[in-house]
Image (spheres, rainbow, N blue to C red):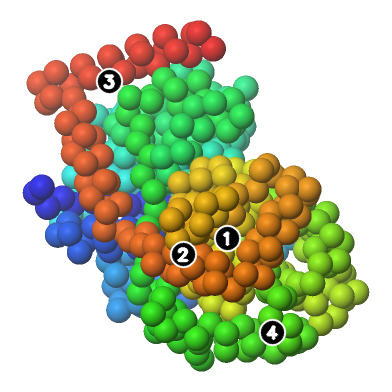
């Protein structure tokens, strides 16, 4: 296909700012598209003055609320445009939550500006020298960009990716007038959501194409159980919805070269994993494992209900009765953090808990653990199970969303036949988690079967290139869906009529 100019807009981009998988995706997908010949760039808020120190000013925002800067460096794979406003800068590197753990009060205004700025770049109003063919917005933080583009008949096509429908950006409706959006947007077919406004609806209802981060999640979000109250809208737009599995950055996450590790390994030479396991236990003050039947279990992830962190807490006594070591790296719900830290104090040598964000430790855990626990209630894609598999750590997952799409259960069949690479938990519950652990430990105690499982996991390839090719096809559809210049709103009318029909039947 012809090379495109693509502007990504998102709230995170690794390594500049990362809270979860969104950061990893925005750090890698634009680079994968650039490698395929496209001119991809990223628009990102500057949450800290440090981020703009080495950036050059491109322009001032027309309303005087801030500046747009460009940052290029060897640490970022594509040019990054930074939106600098006083409100974002004040966040001191914390994109979403204050030090007290509450959302920033000016979220609707700041992320509203982010959407506006993205749309202004897309329309060519803000920057003369570069105008994208496609604006690719991500999650609710950027949901207003397709709204502005729709209202202003932007020449660029819009694509919106849902990374997590659990967060919809719900705010009081008075934000519309503060942002200069017309009152018509306060309507069930536009942004209105039970008397408020949901930014996520902007992307879902107005983007030319919508994607989400796994095929299974694309189906799930069309059901009430996973739809966060927006499943009717998602169904209405299902003809424009594609599920594209995330990839992982195979260079940044490579156990054969990872600078966070002292002992390197891969599927052909797996021995270093054993040494990393010893190093991990020693480094975290856990008792060394002398009995080969004792596995090291791990948790790496946000401590939220989505991930089943409450199930982990409830399962702790049961887990600790078994002959295992458990390592927990995760921050999130404060009460859960404190409960886990207290539990670790009462189980010295067996349980280590780090309620922080620590990138290097995450790498060491994927390398040194035997099993990763993922009892998620929903999981749009999930990257941790893919990192774990590449590092020879077997994931135990509830088969939802991307976990179902990436982890093949060891089942009853011999792992070498089944290409098995993990264990499915029957449901997100304490008993299913413990049953899953028992099943996995049973296999762990059969070294030949376990080795096969580990090898199967390590040779799976979740690369970005095939996902980038799938996004290219979506961009093409989005460009095709654009209204013809002489009949500006024809296709939109058709799609909105369909949308109305389905909403009416809800
Ligand atoms: P989500 O985006 O829902 O949090 P993902 O599995 O997509 O889940 O991505 C999580 C990313 O964040 C992974 O890169 C994981 O290694 C990382 N991560 C999560 N918690 C921590 C933590 N406490 N310290 C370091 N990395 C973490
Ligand atoms: C979200 C989801 C996660 C997904 C990530 C990147 O944070 O919770 O499942 O992997 O976005 O798309």
Give the secondary structure at mark 3: helix
Of the two numbered discs 4 and 3 on the same chain, state the one appearing first in sequence: 4
What's the distance in space between the residues labelled 4 and 3, CA to CA? 58 Å
- x then y, percent, for residue 151: 32, 28
The structure residue drawn at horizontal position 78% and vertical position 86%, both measured from the top left corner, is 287
Mark 4 touches mark 3? (CB < 8 Å) = no
Give the secondary structure at mark 4: helix
**Which disc, if any, is residue 395?**
1
The structure residue drawn at horizontal position 18% and vertical position 21%, both measured from the top left corner, is 488
Q: Nearer the viewer, residue 123 or 505?
A: 505
What's the distance in space between the residues labelled 2 and 1, CA to CA? 9 Å
Which residue corresponds to mark 2? 457
Which residue corresponds to mark 4? 281
Which residue corresponds to mark 3? 492
- Depth check, mark 4 against mark 3: the one in front is 4
The structure residue drawn at horizontal position 25% and vertical position 39%, both measured from the top left corner, is 474
Of the two numbered discs 2 and 3 on the same chain, state the one appearing first in sequence: 2
Dot 3 surroundings within 10 Å: few (below 14), some, or many (20 or more)?
some
Mark 2 touches mark 3? (CB < 8 Å) = no
The image quarter in which residue 205 lies:
top left
- x then y, percent, for residue 428: 69, 44
Mark 2 touches mark 1? (CB < 8 Å) = yes
Residue labelled 3 has its Cβ within 8 Å of some atom of ligand 2: no
- x then y, percent, for residue 271: 50, 86
What's the distance in space between the residues labelled 2 and 3, CA to CA? 44 Å
Is residue 304 among the parts visible in the rendering? no
Dot 1 surroundings within 10 Å: few (below 14), some, or many (20 or more)?
many
- Depth check, mark 2 against mark 4: the one in front is 2
Of the two numbered discs 2 and 1 on the same chain, state the one appearing first in sequence: 1
């Amino acid at each position: 296909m012809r090379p495109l100019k693509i502007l990504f807009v998102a709230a995170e981009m690794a390594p500049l700012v990362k809270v979860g998988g969104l950061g990893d995706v925005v750090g890698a997908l634009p680079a994968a598209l650039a490698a395929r010949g496209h001119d991809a760039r990223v628009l990102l808020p500057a949450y800290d003055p440090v981020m703009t120190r080495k950036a050059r000013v491109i322009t001032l925002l027309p309303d005087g609320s801030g500046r747009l800067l460009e940052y290029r460096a060897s640490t970022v794979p594509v040019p990054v445009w930074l939106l600098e406003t006083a409100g974002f800068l004040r966040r001191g590197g914390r994109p979403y939550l204050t030090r007290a753990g509450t959302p920033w009060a000016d979220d609707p205004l700041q992320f509203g500006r982010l959407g506006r700025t993205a749309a202004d770049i897309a329309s060519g109003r803000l920057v003369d020298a570069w105008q994208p063919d496609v604006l690719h917005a991500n999650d609710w933080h950027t949901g207003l960009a397709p709204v502005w583009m729709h209202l202003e008949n932007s020449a660029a096509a819009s694509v919106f990716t849902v990374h997590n429908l659990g967060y919809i950006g719900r705010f009081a409706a008075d934000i519309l007038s503060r942002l200069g959006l017309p009152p018509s947007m306060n309507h069930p077919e536009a942004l209105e959501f039970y008397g408020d406004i949901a930014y996520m609806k902007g992307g879902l209802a107005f983007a030319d194409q919508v994607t989400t981060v796994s095929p299974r999640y694309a189906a799930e979000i069309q059901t009430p159980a996973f739809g966060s109250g927006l499943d009717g809208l998602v169904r209405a737009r299902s003809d424009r919805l594609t599920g594209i599995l995330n990839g992982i950055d195979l260079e940044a996450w490579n156990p054969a070269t990872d600078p966070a590790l002292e002992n390197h390994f891969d599927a052909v030479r797996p021995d270093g994993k054993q040494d990393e396991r010893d190093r991990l236990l020693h480094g975290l003050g856990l008792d060394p494992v002398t009995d080969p039947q004792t596995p090291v279990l791990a948790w790496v992830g946000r401590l939220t209900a989505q991930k089943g962190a409450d199930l982990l807490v409830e399962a702790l006594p049961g887990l600790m009765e078994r002959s295992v070591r458990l390592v927990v790296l995760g921050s999130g719900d404060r009460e859960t953090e404190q409960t886990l830290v207290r539990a670790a104090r009462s189980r010295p040598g067996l349980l280590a808990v780090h309620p922080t964000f620590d990138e290097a430790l995450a790498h060491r855990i994927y390398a040194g653990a035997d099993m990763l626990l993922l009892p998620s209630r929903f999981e749009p894609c999930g990257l941790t199970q893919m990192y774990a598999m590449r590092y020879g750590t077997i994931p135990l997952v509830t088969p939802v969303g991307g976990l179902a799409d990436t982890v093949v259960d060891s089942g009853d069949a011999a792992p070498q036949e089944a290409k098995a690479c993990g264990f499915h938990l029957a449901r997100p519950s304490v008993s299913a988690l413990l049953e899953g652990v028992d099943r996995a430990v049973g296999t762990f105690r059969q070294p030949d079967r376990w080795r096969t499982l580990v090898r199967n996991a390590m040779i799976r390839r979740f690369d970005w290139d095939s996902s980038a090719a799938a996004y290219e096809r979506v961009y093409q559809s989005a460009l095709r869906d654009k209204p013809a210049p002489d009949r500006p709103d024809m296709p939109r009318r058709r799609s909105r009529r369909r949308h109305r029909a389905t909403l009416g039947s809800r």
